[in-house]
Amino acid sequence: MDLARVIGRVVSTLKIEGLEGVTLQWIQPLHGDGTPLGRPLVACDTAHSGIGDLVYYIDGREASFPLPVRFVPVDATIVGHVEEVGLKSNQTFPRFDPKY
Amino acid sequence: MIIGKVIGSVVSTQKDDKMRDMKLLIVQRHDHNNKPVEEIAVCVDAVGAGLHEMVLYCTGSSARQTKLTEGKPCDAVIMAILNSWDIAGKEIFQKERDA
C-alpha cells in the first residue's frame, strides 16, 4: 500500500455496474517524506476521506476487495486514514494539508 | 484509475479469437488539470463511451474484472464516463461546458 494525499473529487453517473454509490477521489501518491510521487490518479474511496486528508491506498487487483461488489474493474482504492507518520528522521508531515 | 479523452477507435478483424466482439477505443491520457499527456492506451470499452468523451480507465489485471473482459487478453478497460471533477475545490472539468 502507498501513502497519498486526497486532492480532489470525481463525479461520474455512468459507471460500470457494481460501482454504484462508490465515491471516486483524486489522490496524489506521496514518498515517505511527504513529497509527491508521480502523477495524481483516481481511486475509489471506502474510508470517507475528505480533500486534504492523508490516506493510504491499495492498488492492483486487490483494490476491488474493499468494495461492496468485488467483481469490478478497479485498480486503486483508499482503505484508511493516516493519523501520524513516524520516521527515523522523526520529521513529521501534516495529517491535513490546508493547501487543498 | 486514469482519466483520458477518447480520441479514436480501432478496427481489427484479424485478431485473437478471445478479442471478438470487443469495442476498442484509443484514449489519450489527461492529467488532473485536464491537459493531455504523452500517453495513449487502446482500451476495451465496457460502458459505451463515444468520441471526445472524458473517460476513466483501469489498467492491469483488474481490467479483466468485467463480464465482457473476464478471461480475455485485456489490460485496459474503460469503466466510467466522467461528468465533472474538481481539484482543491476548483472545478477543472464539466462535461456540458467542456465537451
Image (cartoon, coloured by chain):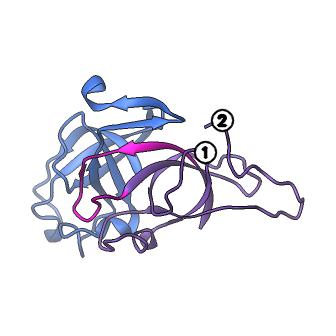
Decide whether residue B53 is among the magenta residues: no
Q: Determine whether label 1 and label 2 are within 8 Å by CB.
A: yes
Residue A92, percent across and down?
A: 82, 54
The residue that appears at 28% across and 31% down in the rendered structure is B95
Position in image of residue A31 (x %, y %): 70, 54
- The segment highlighted magenta reads A6-22
- Give me the disc on residue A52: 1
Crowding at mark 2 (Cα within 10 Å: few <14, some 14-19, many 20+): few
- Tell me if residue A12 is in the magenta stretch: yes
- Label 2 marks a residue whose chain is A
Residue B47 vertical placement versus A10 (above, below): below
Taking A93 as reference, is B86 left or right? Answer: left
What secondary structure is found at the residue carrying circle 2?
Answer: loop
Total of numbered circles in the picture? 2
Amino acid type, residue under disc 1 in the picture: Gly
Residue drawn at x 39%, y 54% as measured from the top left: A23
